[in-house]
Amino acid sequence: MKLKRRSFLKLVGATGAGLALSQMGFDVRPIEAASNECRIHSAREYTSVCNFCSCGCGMICHVKDGKLINLEGDPDHVVSEGTLCSKGASTSMIPNSDQRVKTPLYRAPGSDRWEEISWETAIEKVAKKIKQTRDDHWITDETIGGETYTVNRTDAIGFLGGAQINNEECYLMTKMARLLGVSFLEHQARV
């Protein structure tokens, strides 16, 4: 059984408090019964990073039955040391919102309404559009000051990253942009 430091301290504290109370003659059975009904008792605990800005504050998320039920700052996180700003603290509203779009939407040219499409269809449409745009606007050579240089790039596509992606995802996004020949690459945290 792997026990993290935080879980170990909780276990030791609860055991010590239980032993102390039982030695004083208190009946701890109602406390144990109440702890079994605690809302995060059977929830799975995950650590995450806030997605609102590039600070990267740590969060502890409790998920039960596929739903986020509790969110708090991670006291073991090096950046935030357990604190969250008001935006970070309200992050729990995002996955639990009834207005959250969960499937890709497509609006055909000239249409006035959005229609749901499958993820496969959406990915295929985006891939075809990227390929078509890249091929239509590919620049092989560029002449500057009478000299011709091989540039192999497209100026018709740009990549824009955000704070929602971590360093590893940012690295992969940069590699993908460079492989596509994209020269316009920008990121909130400056890649």
Image: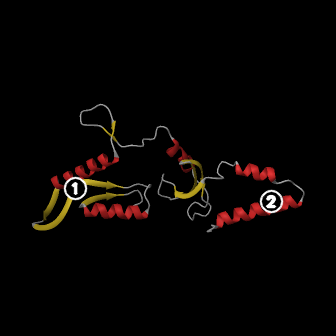
Q: Quadrant of residue 187?
A: bottom left
Q: Residues within 10 Å of mark 1 (few under 14, many from 20)?
A: some
Where does label 1 land, which residue?
A: 155
Question: Percent from the top left, x then y, of residue 24?
Answer: 89, 59
Q: Measure how far apart labels 2 and 1 are at the Cα level.
A: 67 Å
Report the colour scheme: secondary structure
The residue where tag 2 is placed is 18
In the image, residue 179 above or below residue 130: below
Q: Nearer the viewer, residue 30 or 164?
A: 30
| Residue 127 in the image, given as x and y percentages of width and height | 26, 52
- The location of residue 178, given as percent across then percent down, is 27, 63
Label whose residue precedes the other's in the sequence (2 or 1): 2
Which residue in the rendered view is the most extreme toward the left? Answer: 146
**Horizontal side, residue 110 vs residue 119: left or right:** left
**Toward the viewer: 95 or 43?**
43
Q: Amino acid at mark 2?
A: Gly
Crowding near the residue tagged with mark 2, few <14, some 14–19, many ≥20 C-alpha atoms within 10 Å: some
Residue placed furthest toward the right: 25
Q: Is residue 151 left or right of residue 55?
A: left
Q: Residue at x 12, y 65 (%)?
A: 145
Q: Position of residue 16 (x, y in %)?
A: 79, 63
Q: Is residue 58 visible?
A: no
Element under label 1? strand
Is 17 displayed left or right of 74 in the figure?
right
Of labels 2 and 1, the one closer to you: 2
Q: How many marks?
A: 2
